[in-house]
Image (cartoon, rainbow, N blue to C red):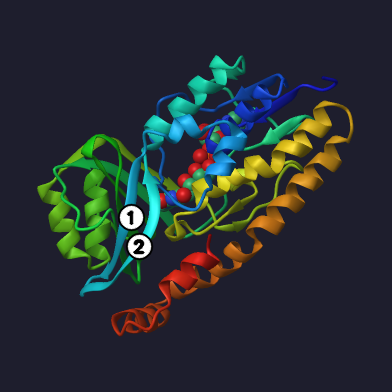
Amino acid sequence: MKHPISIAGGGLAGLSLGIALQSRGVPVTLYEASTYPRHRVCGEFISGVSDETLAALGIDSCLAGATSLQSVSWSDGAGKLAEMDAPGRGVSRWQLDDLLQRQFVAQGGTLHTNSRAVPAVGVVWAAGRPRKPSPWLGLKCHARRLALSHDLEMFTSPFGYVGLSKIEDGKVNICGLFKSGRTDGAKGTGLLIAVLRRCALNALADRLEDAELDESSFCGAAGFQTGTQDGPSFRIGDAAAMIPPFTGNGMSMAFESAECGLQPALDYASGRISWTEAGGAAAAGQSARFRRRMTTAGLLHRFLMNPTGLKLIGALARSGCLPFQSILHLVR
Ligand SMILES: Cc1cc2nc3c(=O)[nH]c(=O)nc-3n(C[C@H](O)[C@H](O)[C@H](O)COP(=O)(O)OP(=O)(O)OC[C@H]3O[C@@H](n4cnc5c(N)ncnc54)[C@H](O)[C@@H]3O)c2cc1C
């Protein structure tokens, strides 16, 4: 190999690209700002990624133990709006990212944890959503003793949306994206419950108060915006484009963007193309693959976060007139 590759960010995009490059004989050094295992703000519901993509990246075994999910319900503060099928996998980021980093290291990759990279030639930028001023607050925690009516329960309100998804060991992940607002000093899982009450999702808040919430799994994220992102020339994952979370497709896009970056990174490593050309090829691949879902999800997000739009979508759903499967197809 003429050029070594480094990767900034050991989330799903960075680790899966690192594994794919290592298995093709390219030495990779990966820098991760935090350590493993660790919780991340994420719905932990993986939907849409194909078995072919997982096999091409060589990460299928890391997802083999994920919980298989099928049924989805959608409700608002007034009750159920719809039920549908949306096949997916449930697995915590605590478990999945740890399995991926172990595989990367087992394949000979060099991993530096608690270590931040800076943009440079030869550094693939997989550092997640860039920091930007925004009104969003993402919150998540795990629960036990929380029975679900469906594998994934989704709830919407004019102040945000939240999903409850089955993950490993009988646990449930609760994760939502909310508009920032007053929470009267509530902290940890108490903050999540306070935010649900502000969203008038009181029945759900009551259910969480009766469940066993794992305080150590609680985490929050603020200061990010969905959509296409700016940054260093060769970007993958959320660092390139962040799809609105309710689609449950960001993790799949992280894997798929690693697949889009694989051939350009191989071509750069072997000296066939420059770093700028490699970044351009990776960006073109992602744009072609994700354009439709990013546009559709952006529009839906605007509707869901607007009281009038939400009322309209809710009325259509209650009357059975919302074409869920077609919408699902557009965001996959
Ligand atoms: C509220 C919410 C709910 C979501 N729910 C879902 C869902 O149910 N299903 C789904 O598919 N997607 C969901 N997503 C999206 C999903 O979490 C992301 O799309 C996915 O994590 C992107 O992976 P990534 O590898 O690009 O970034 P990340 O997973 O964010 O990884 C980036 C890594 O880079 C590290 N890092 C940052 N800066 C540096 C640096 N300078 N040097 C080195 N390391 C650095 C960070 O520590 C981090 O580990 C959700 C997102 C949010 C906010």
Q: Residue at x 27, y 69 (%)?
A: 75
Give the total number of marks visible in the rendering. 2
- Tell me the residue that label 1 is attached to: 70
Q: Nearer the viewer, residue 85 or 200?
A: 85
Is 134 displayed left or right of 282 in the figure? left
Q: Is residue 292 left or right of residue 176?
A: right
Q: Which residue is drawn at 19% across and 59% down?
A: 204
**In the image shown, does 270 or 236 lie closer to the viewer?**
270
Q: How crowded is mark 1: few (under 14 residues within 10 Å), some or many (20 or more)?
A: some
Residue type (three-letter) at the residue carrying disc 2: Asp
Dot 2 and dot 1 residues touching (CB under 8 Å)? yes
Q: Residue 85 carries which label?
A: 2
Q: Tell me which corner region of the image, top left, top right, bottom left or bottom right, holds residue 173.
A: top left
Residue 260 showing in the rendered view: yes
User: Could you say where residue 83 lies in the image, as x and y percent from the top left?
Assistant: 29, 68
Q: Is mark 1 on a helix, strand or loop?
A: strand
Residue type (three-letter) at the residue carrying disc 1: Gln
In the displayed structure image, the side of residue 315 where residue 14 appears, left or right = right
Q: Does the residue labelled 1 lie within 8 Å of ligand 1?
A: no
